[in-house]
Image (spheres, helix red, strand yellow):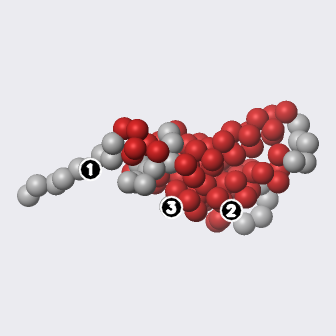
Amino acid sequence: MRLAAGAAILARGLPRLGLGPPLQYLIFWGLAVTAGILLLAGLWTPCSGSAVAAVGFWCAISEPGDPWADLLLASIGAGLALTGPGAWSIDAKLFGWKRIDVHE
């Protein structure tokens, strides 16, 4: 999920940075691309997942066209922010992989 969300936000944000947009869009898409890179690496996953969720939701309500892909990206970002990066990530190497065992 991390790789799919990170690649999707990078594919969406990188072309928009090259167009020379106004400063507020440059900052917005710059943060989105940064969040995508962090998600790909698995670093600061709760923060970058939240940023991807916010970008996806904002694009769904503010841009014309079909909002379903943006809402899917937002839900994946929110899911990653809540569940964490997984075992193969920089977060897991730096801080350890958190595992919750449920005993009956």
Q: Say which mark, if any, is on residue 65.
A: none
Cβ–Cβ below 8 Å for labels 1 and 2?
Answer: no
Amino acid identity at mark 3: Met
Which one is in front, 34 or 61? Answer: 34
Q: Quadrant of the C terminus?
A: bottom left
Q: Say which mark, if any, is on residue 1.
A: 3
Q: Residues within 10 Å of mark 3 (few under 14, many from 20)?
A: some
Residue 80 image point, x, y percent = 47, 52
Please tell me which residue is depicted at 37% across the width and 38% down the height of the picture: 95
- Which of discs 1 and 2 lies nearer the camera? The answer is 1
Label 3 – label 1 distance at C-alpha: 18 Å
Reading the image, the residue beneath label 1 is: 99
Reading the image, the residue beneath label 2 is: 67
Q: Is residue 81 above or below residue 76?
A: above
Which one is in front, 80 or 63? Answer: 80
Left or right: 15, with 55 as reference point: right
Which is nearer the N-term, disc 3 or disc 2?
Answer: 3
Amino acid identity at mark 2: Pro
Number of numbered discs on residues: 3
Residue 58 image point, x, y percent = 67, 48
Residue 89 image point, x, y percent = 45, 50
Q: Residues within 10 Å of mark 1 (few under 14, many from 20)?
A: few
Which element is circle 3 on?
loop
Left or right: 31, with 87 as reference point: right
Residue 53 visible here = no
Which is nearer the N-term, disc 3 or disc 1?
Answer: 3
Which one is in front, 98 or 70? Answer: 98
Amino acid identity at mark 1: Arg
